[in-house]
Image (tube, coloured by chain):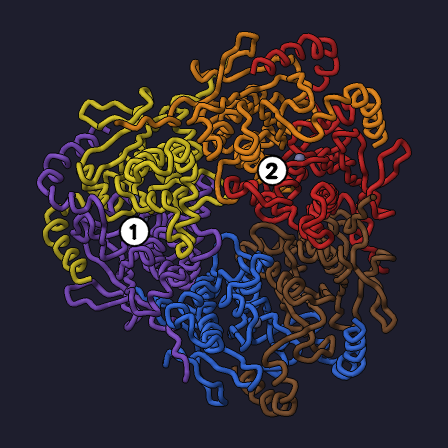
Chain colours: A brown, B red, C orange, D yellow, E purple, F blue
Amino acid sequence: MHRIIDGVLRFQTEIHGKRQELFSELGERQKPFAVFIACSDSRVVPELLTQCDPGDIFVIRNAGNIIPSYGPASGGVSASIEYAVQGLGIPNLIVCGHSDCGAMKAILRDDKLDKMPAVGAWIKHAAAAKQIVEARFSPEEDEKRRLNALVHENVLCQLRNLATHPAVAAKLAAGQLSLHGWVYNIDSGTVDTFDAEKQEFVTLTRDSTAQATPKLIVRYSQKK
Amino acid sequence: MHRIIDGVLRFQTEIHGKRQELFSELGERQKPFAVFIACSDSRVVPELLTQCDPGDIFVIRNAGNIIPSYGPASGGVSASIEYAVQGLGIPNLIVCGHSDCGAMKAILRDDKLDKMPAVGAWIKHAAAAKQIVEARFSPEEDEKRRLNALVHENVLCQLRNLATHPAVAAKLAAGQLSLHGWVYNIDSGTVDTFDAEKQEFVTLTRDSTAQATPKLIVRYSQKK
Amino acid sequence: MHRIIDGVLRFQTEIHGKRQELFSELGERQKPFAVFIACSDSRVVPELLTQCDPGDIFVIRNAGNIIPSYGPASGGVSASIEYAVQGLGIPNLIVCGHSDCGAMKAILRDDKLDKMPAVGAWIKHAAAAKQIVEARFSPEEDEKRRLNALVHENVLCQLRNLATHPAVAAKLAAGQLSLHGWVYNIDSGTVDTFDAEKQEFVTLTRDSTAQATPKLIVRYSQKK
Amino acid sequence: MHRIIDGVLRFQTEIHGKRQELFSELGERQKPFAVFIACSDSRVVPELLTQCDPGDIFVIRNAGNIIPSYGPASGGVSASIEYAVQGLGIPNLIVCGHSDCGAMKAILRDDKLDKMPAVGAWIKHAAAAKQIVEARFSPEEDEKRRLNALVHENVLCQLRNLATHPAVAAKLAAGQLSLHGWVYNIDSGTVDTFDAEKQEFVTLTRDSTAQATPKLIVRYSQKK
Amino acid sequence: MHRIIDGVLRFQTEIHGKRQELFSELGERQKPFAVFIACSDSRVVPELLTQCDPGDIFVIRNAGNIIPSYGPASGGVSASIEYAVQGLGIPNLIVCGHSDCGAMKAILRDDKLDKMPAVGAWIKHAAAAKQIVEARFSPEEDEKRRLNALVHENVLCQLRNLATHPAVAAKLAAGQLSLHGWVYNIDSGTVDTFDAEKQEFVTLTRDSTAQATPKLIVRYSQKK
Amino acid sequence: MHRIIDGVLRFQTEIHGKRQELFSELGERQKPFAVFIACSDSRVVPELLTQCDPGDIFVIRNAGNIIPSYGPASGGVSASIEYAVQGLGIPNLIVCGHSDCGAMKAILRDDKLDKMPAVGAWIKHAAAAKQIVEARFSPEEDEKRRLNALVHENVLCQLRNLATHPAVAAKLAAGQLSLHGWVYNIDSGTVDTFDAEKQEFVTLTRDSTAQATPKLIVRYSQKK
Ligand SMILES: [Zn+2]
Ligand SMILES: [Zn+2]
Ligand SMILES: [Zn+2]
Ligand SMILES: [Zn+2]
Ligand SMILES: [Zn+2]
Ligand SMILES: [Zn+2]
């Protein structure tokens, strides 16, 4: 804990002190421009990856960057999304998976979960991704390759779950929200982003206009 | 009840007796070619509307033709879909709403629901459709028009919920399932079908190739 | 799908066109006289079996014709029943099982359910029927015989579950609802109906007055 | 607390010491002959009312002597019943309500429940009893009379809920369990017991053979 | 049942008749001074153990004297506690485990639970106690010793669960509620009580001031 | 989104490129030394506040830094904690609230929540904190002061909830986990930390040894 306490004191003198204006302003309101949903994994630091300042991004983090689909027994992810999209009106939302994800490994291997029942229940929200990967790959296939596929499919799976949230569906239908599906590669630093037009993940570049926003089955044009 | 009992006896002599071969064959197996999800409304008769024989379509019916999104507390609709799509391998699935739907009226009007708490809880699975209609129409707008919009949006909402079911997602990813979103107009007999390419409902005709199958965010092409 | 689309078009010209008056009238209201709860099985067609017209029966269908007992996490069956019995005031309710039911087979065999967790959870609502059959029959007993017993016990089990629904209990206490427990034999076309007086299933005939309405523990006569 | 601690010490010297043989025997096993389900109300003391010794009755107590119907989210009452009926094989089960019950008053009055959400949720398991009483009595009717009716109807309602528990249904079907529905009148000391034959509550007397065991819809006689 | 009916009649003549004044007074109100949470086990008789009269203690009993932690799906224990602590304002609360507890044995042995799924689910609320005992003892350790530890740890586990109930937390913060953790030894008649100061169980004696009231993390002194 | 994409590209060249060794090492494992549970609020950046590197802290973030108590319907927070504490064996855990928290304001004001039902359900996990603040402060009291109290009480409330998680309870009992309760003041940059010995929040300083680890009711010393 000493390392963390020292870090806080260093933050107070070196960072907070020097940007007093920013923090004073932030003291009474936030106006973030993106929701960032990422894994709790210590190697994924959303504000570092996006080079964002305090006040820029609203961050939801849990094991596996999982978003349960909307239902009566909604929990913390549903509440946080509702608060961000409907309460704060944030116009961009990024679901970000990452390489070497422990939650995804737990799904692939089905191991150690007797001892971790809450983890076992939680990753069922990624069952669709698991089932797709099982249909595509033989169990003999190289685990790294299957894990990489699962990490990507999981992001798509969570985007589909996300589309069932009323606040998200309404903002999408009104054209006031854009969705993005990312996978961050820890080792290389690269980011894959889902391109809904091409229906594939592409590398994120400066000119990237890729969106995961589901164009289909979200709009209904009433016939006159 | 006499009318129903008489009906059964008439069925036994006039229908079953004359098609003994069909029923004998059906006695030990079913091999339906479509799943049909419709409202419990007495005016909607799936087998009559589609002119199907016993053995042709697997039918799920509840108030509002609602499909809760997939989650840990899955119920009868989830189980029936899982059984149909994964267990029986049925390759087509139609979600069929209808005009003048009482469940949709209950959503629009928010009335009478103190006395019907189970109905009140159930129609929350169509909250996304409700929120979209509320965003599009002023409450002063003609109720018929808003109801018609809600009936259509509800079908799209249920298709999005459907996409979170692992069995459905896996079959869609494998190209082994096609989805269809219909609205049956009781008065005119016409059927609107959602065309995912055009992103609108079109009238069902002989040459109709419209599918609601969501093309986007369901496929992931792993890069080599 | 072509077969279904052709069916719809045939319905439009051959059926709907010829009974325009009925459908126009139905366009704005329904007044069904019975609730019919049946399995989703493609071989069970409630309106065909009862020779009913559109507008006659309110139909709830799911895998196994299951009715979860009433509780805080009520789902689609509870909502549909509440809507039918309390909202529409329908005075008759039939729970109809059928021979060769796949859901009942899944209960008997306990097989394939790792791959179908939603089915596994759903059929727990028939656990009482299963436990009764297990107590009555040795596992070596002929499967057909045990399946037949389970199909019948399941109807009784669902009637007991039904009796816990407040709307049903209140209508029963007021003498405004009668319950019927049926088993439809696909092969022979016969229907067994539960006779609460005799406490056994009897064959449905023209003079049948059998009711499954539980007379006991539903009425309370306050002493003066 | 002193009063309670003094009571324990008095128990140790005056009761336990004098019946050492009984308690030694009980130290390693229990073999109760009845399950007694009663309200948590301090005025209801099951062992005093029935003059039973330690080891005689298995007691379940909660606010309102409520038994949720069986379902996937079963709680403590379901578990305790399952343990008693299936695990210990106890052959008698008594559901005992009582006069002036606070939980029943809370149902009648709908008051104070904003501050007590858990109570509000819990008494929904008696919604059927409430709905029956509301159908039978005008709200202007004397409250004591309505409360008395509710207390009795609640016992019947919980017996119906009880009938959905697999262990109970199986033992009933096997004729190995008998059910009893009681109401204890604190003031007079009398006990009303439900007589399923007569379909009414009668005063408990020495010759009482009244049983609440539901005879109907629990047995299925397979036709040869 | 004859034994129980005879007991009731004996109660009416020998007990109720002789204390008519007490019962008349109790007829319209209760004012208990303690909540007593105990196992349903027939050998544990709270009013006998504490030598309490009708009207003295509010009693909650279920298999394992388990108190689920507070959450959205609260059940009968939560409701009963809320009613007792908030509704009735009872100032003392005792959680009382006991030796040779069947529910605790079921946790230790993990046996017979396939047949008793509700019991299996219920005892998960004591998973923390189980995990602590597993960490402390080798599985080869004498079962009696492990069982004894589990019985004690379970009481502490349930006290922690209790601390999450809003009504309890608020009363504790206001200094209006004291908690006690007991273990009753059936064979010897002794009672162990948790002493939060010493952090261990001590034998209950006349001068016992031991409280399980968690002193830490319940109070917040706002700085001026 | 351009700002975020530019940020990622800047990260890749300026940060990832320069610390290739760290990221290569992190590519295949994480070994964080603390779990940090914070609000999703954009102004709270755990890694900035603690000056931690990628790989240092496992971060869970949701609206209100809420930790539901352990139960059968566990969600993402429970799973993430279980994974962190049991799976990864992380020895320190910090629950960090913050000034001006929107979720806490929503609790205080009870406003806007009809439109945000998931938020309304989620903040019920802080009901104990709300109830304590309501007992301590008159509603006329200055809102800022009440909000500040609620933010602090919420951290204590979540620590109590945390104590019900089996993995946490077991590690606490084994002395292998220490808990910390923080409140970060955005404007001043200061951090309050709960001192369980003093039973109050103190300012975090270099020599701070304050722990929120509940000493009481977590240990059980078996008597020989
Ligand atoms: Zn991860
Ligand atoms: Zn409808
Ligand atoms: Zn079937
Ligand atoms: Zn009571
Ligand atoms: Zn016990
Ligand atoms: Zn916050």
Mark 2 and mark 1 in contact? Answer it, CB < 8 Å: no
Badges 2 and 1, same chain: no
Can see residue C165?
yes
Q: Residue furthest left?
A: E18
Q: Is residue F24 visible?
A: no
Q: Position of residue C40 (x, y in %)?
A: 66, 29
Residue at point 44%, 67% (across, down): F129
Amino acid of disc 1? Ala
Q: Nearer the viewer, residue E207 or F154?
A: F154
Measured as percent of width and height from the top left, residue B129 is found at: 69, 48
Instruction: Locate residue B106, reporting x and y percent.
Output: 61, 41
Seen at 26% across and 42% down, the residue is D100
Judging from the image, what secondary structure is the residue with disc 2 in? helix
Could you tell whether A206 is left or right of B4 in the image?
Answer: right
Q: Residue at x 73, y 42 (%)?
A: B155
Give residue E38's mark: 1
Residue C122 drawn above or below residue C192: below
Query: Which residue sits at x=52%, y=53%?
Result: F73
Chain of the residue that carries numbered disc 2 in the rendered image? B
User: What amino acid is labelled 2 in the image?
Assistant: Gly
How packed mark 2 is, by other alpha carbons closer than 10 Å (few <14, some 14-19, many 20 or more), is many
Vertical arrangement, residue C201 with respect to residue F197, above or below: above
Q: Is residue B5 above or below residue E168?
A: above
Judging by the rendered image, the residue that carries numbered circle 2 is B76
Q: Quadrant of the C terminus of chain A?
A: top right
